[in-house]
């Protein structure tokens, strides 16, 4: 449904051009929910605006379906791109009612729509986002969550092939945001509409997406399913940005027949899953998420990936016990089961499941990758 090939965009400044997007390529399959995730300034919103036609790229091509909308001498204006878009600010018209806000794209669009069809399609869009009965209400009198739904209804009323969402939940409080992200995901699945979503929120990306593309400095650092990106990060940047993780530096000593790596760290030898091609002598970082580290008592004896440490702090947080464990001069963050009764300063034994230990390149930086979903 969407194909972006070698997209680049720079902005002119007094000190010369500043690249915002650098040779980015990815594809979004029909019906997918594809998320561009990254911090401010990483290029995610610029990429979205280029697809929307709000920015003119310096290079590359963009296709929606089989239609070239940007590239070479072609630049299709936004209103002719068959897209719907929801902005971070919602951009609803404050002097209009709910009905008139949703009807606006149909009244000014290239397609001629009868008055009855406008009423029917507006009613359908409002029903889809659960705003039935609010047609005559002035838009500013809606709550924040209702305004977000109104912006979504206005984007859907034209029945676009592609829906673009630019951090639409960032202005809402945490509880409302959690509820609405589930509503948007359910709506997208029910309608089957191809969606490109931009956010800096890792939880939003993991909870809603078919594919997550993590961006850094104008490049896609890694793209894949939410579980793949979370459990098998390909660089320190991705591992740190998507959730919380522990790192232990080490050196690859051997390669197991099943493809696992044996890595010697200061804390001891660890069997890890590789996300890079690494031979003996390669310097790597072993990454493991806090929730996968298990705490056993001092009498536990395991065959592999067992480390001895000292519990520095243990804070009961209801759902888990948040722990810091010192192991060979390194602090490991552990989320232990809430039933464990732990005391600061006690000796503990940690087990690190080899399936959850990932060896990544200690020097890896973001690189442009092909990303399909």
Image: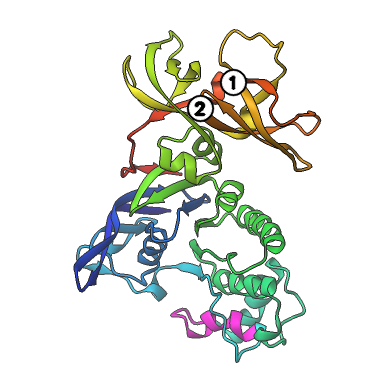
Segment colored magenta: 99-112
Instruction: Report x, y in % for residue 77.
Output: 34, 74
The label number, if any, that marks residue 329 in the structure image: 2
Q: What residue sits 54% from the left and 67% below the top?
A: 159
Residue most toward the front? 345
Residue 63 occupies quadrant: bottom left
| Residue at the spot of label 1 | 353
Q: What residue sits 19% from the left and 69% below the top?
A: 15
Residue 43 to residue 52: above or below: above
Q: What residue sits 32% from the left and 58% below the top?
A: 62
- Mark 2 or mark 1, which is nearer to you? 2
Callout 2 environment at 10 Å: few (<14), some (14 to 19), or many (20+)? few
User: Foreground residue, 189 or 54?
Assistant: 54
Q: Quick check: is 257 in the magenta stretch? A: no
Taking the image as shown, residue 16 lies to the left or right of residue 38, namely: left
User: Foreground residue, 141 or 318?
Assistant: 318
Taking the image as shown, residue 79 lies to the left or right of residue 166, namely: left
Q: Assign the magenta stretch its main secondary structure.
A: helix
Q: Are marks 2 and 1 in contact (CB under 8 Å)?
A: no
Instruction: Report x, y in % for residue 265.
Output: 45, 20
């Amino acid at each position: 449904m969407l194909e972006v090939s070698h997209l680049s965009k720079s902005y002119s400044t007094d000190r010369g051009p500043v690249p915002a997007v650098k040779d980015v390529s990815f594809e979004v399959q029909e019906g997918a929910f594809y998320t561009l995730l990254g911090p401010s300034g990483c290029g995610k919103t610029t990429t979205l605006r280029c697809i929307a036609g709000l920015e003119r790229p310096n290079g590359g091509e963009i296709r929606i379906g089989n239609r070239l909308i940007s590239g070479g001498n072609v630049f299709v204006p936004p209103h002719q791109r068959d897209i719907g878009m929801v902005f971070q600010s919602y951009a609803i018209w404050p002097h209009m009612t709910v009905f008139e806000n949703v009807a606006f794209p149909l009244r000014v669009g290239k397609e001629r729509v009868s008055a009855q069809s406008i009423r029917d399609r507006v009613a359908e869009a409002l029903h889809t986002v659960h705003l039935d009965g609010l047609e005559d209400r002035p838009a500013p009198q809606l709550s924040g969550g209702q305004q977000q739904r109104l912006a979504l209804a206005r984007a859907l009323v034209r029945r676009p092939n592609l829906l673009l969402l630019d951090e639409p939940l960032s202005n809402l409080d945490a509880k409302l945001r959690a509820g609405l992200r589930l509503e948007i995901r359910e709506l997208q699945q029910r309608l089957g509409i191809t969606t490109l979503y931009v956010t800096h929120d890792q939880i939003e990306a993991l909870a809603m997406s078919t594919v997550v593309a993590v961006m850094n400095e104008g490049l896609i650092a890694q793209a894949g399913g939410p579980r793949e990106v979370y459990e098998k990060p390909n660089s320190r940047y991705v591992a740190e940005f998507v959730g919380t993780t522990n790192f232990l530096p080490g050196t690859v000593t051997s390669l197991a027949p099943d493809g696992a790596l044996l890595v010697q760290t200061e804390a001891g030898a660890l069997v890890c899953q590789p996300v890079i091609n690494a031979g003996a002598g390669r310097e790597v970082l072993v990454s493991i998420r806090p929730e996968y580290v298990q705490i056993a008592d001092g009498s536990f004896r395991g065959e592999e990936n067992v480390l001895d440490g000292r519990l520095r702090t243990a804070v009961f947080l209801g759902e888990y016990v948040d722990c810091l464990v010192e192991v060979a001069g390194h602090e490991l963050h552990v989320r232990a089961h809430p039933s464990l009764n732990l005391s600061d300063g006690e000796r503990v034994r940690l087990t690190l499941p080899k399936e959850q230990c990932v060896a990544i390149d200690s020097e890896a930086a973001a690189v442009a990758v092909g990303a399909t979903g």
